[in-house]
Amino acid sequence: MRVLTTETRRRIEDVIKRLSSGDPVRLDERIQLNKYAIHFPFIAGKLSQALRKRETLEADGLI
């Protein structure tokens, strides 16, 4: 069983938060996020939610 450190979890949550709000995210951060999402289902779920939220905001013209 794999475990994330608190620092890693917070860093990932920050990237996901920036993705959902439309703020810029560097390519290396997105690559790292994708790697974690492959191995940790809860990260994949949070990422999916963030991307859906961003699509909604873009559709409403808020981003």
Image (cartoon, rainbow, N blue to C red):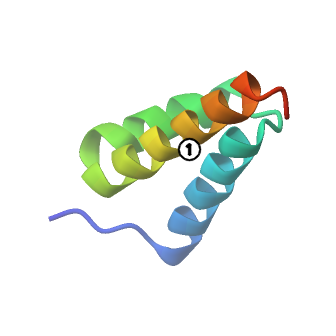
Residue farthest to the bottom, as pictured: 6
Residue at 60% in and 41% down: 53
Camera-side residue of 33 and 48: 48
Camera-side residue of 20 and 7: 20
Q: Position of residue 58 (x, y in %)?
A: 74, 26
The answer to whether residue 57 is left or right of residue 43 is right
Residue 50 occupies which quadrant of the picture? top right
Q: Position of residue 45 (x, y in %)?
A: 36, 48
Residue at 76% in and 29% down: 60
Residue 3 occupies which quadrant of the picture? bottom left
Q: Secondary structure at mark 1?
A: helix
Question: Up-down: is 12 above or below 37?
Answer: below
Amino acid carrying mark 1 in the image = Ala
The answer to whether residue 18 is left or right of residue 36 is right
Q: Which residue is mark 1?
A: 50
Q: Residues within 10 Å of mark 1 (few under 14, many from 20)?
A: some
